[in-house]
Image (tube, grey):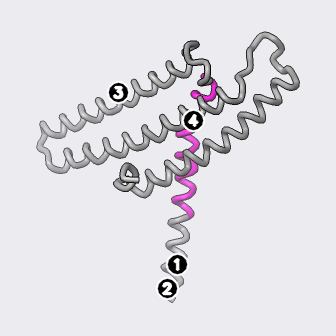
Amino acid sequence: MGLFSNLSKTAKIMILSSVAVYFVLLILGLIILNAAAYFNIFGDSIEIEKNLPYALGLALGVVHSVVKIIMIEKAMIKIADKIETADENGKKHAKNMGQLYYFGRFFITIAVLVVGALPAVPFIGFLGTIVGIFSLRFAAYLTSAIEAKIEKKQQEEQEINLE
């Protein structure tokens, strides 16, 4: 796990949250897709995604989210180092570097969406890919809740130790 060893505690929690969100969204998505197919909710107007393409698309989206978390973490560290040791020109360079990293992440997201939407790749579902990409938001909320609980528990332990 050399790739994850240099990450902050928050990034590690966010990656674990992304994996947890993957399994929750996988189960919910499969239930909804199978119920829609069984009850013929959409009729013949919309072709419902099959189970495996949804799962693989969701996995692609979640892997994208994990890669994005790692890229954001690395970019933040590089930019913060640049700002601390730089003069005015260096700060402008750090700002430009931040924008470059942002566009890099943006283009990776577009590439993942294109792969999920291509008819030439029928084993990856577009719906699953979109849900997987949005799973980053759910993981962020979950991470915030987990960190709040950890902080509260640490404060309670400090209060107990002071008594």
Determine which residue is flagged by label 3.
Answer: 103
Cβ–Cβ under 8 Å for marks 2 and 3: no
Q: Position of residue 108 (x, y in %)?
A: 41, 27
Kindly identify the residue that appears in the image at 43 percent across and 58 percent down: 9
The amino acid type of the residue labelled 4 equals Ala
Q: Earlier in the sequence, mark 2 or mark 3?
A: 3
Which segment did they paint magenta? Answer: 126-149
Kindly identify the residue that appears in the image at 35 percent across and 28 percent down: 104
The amino acid type of the residue labelled 3 equals Phe
Determine which residue is flagged by label 4.
Answer: 59
Q: Is residue 152 above or below residue 133?
A: below
Q: Earlier in the sequence, mark 1 or mark 3?
A: 3
> Disc 4 and disc 2: Cα gap in Å?
44 Å
Determine which residue is flagged by label 2.
Answer: 161
The amino acid type of the residue labelled 1 equals Glu
Cβ–Cβ under 8 Å for marks 1 and 2: yes
Mark toward the viewer: 4 or 3:
4
Kindly identify the residue that appears in the image at 55 percent across and 49 percent down: 17
The furthest residue to the right = 39
Q: Residues within 10 Å of mark 1 (few under 14, many from 20)?
A: few
> Disc 2 and disc 3: Cα gap in Å?
48 Å
The amino acid type of the residue labelled 2 equals Asn
> Disc 4 and disc 3: Cα gap in Å?
23 Å
> Disc 1 and disc 2: Cα gap in Å?
6 Å
56 to the left or right of 33: left
Which label was assigned to residue 157? 1
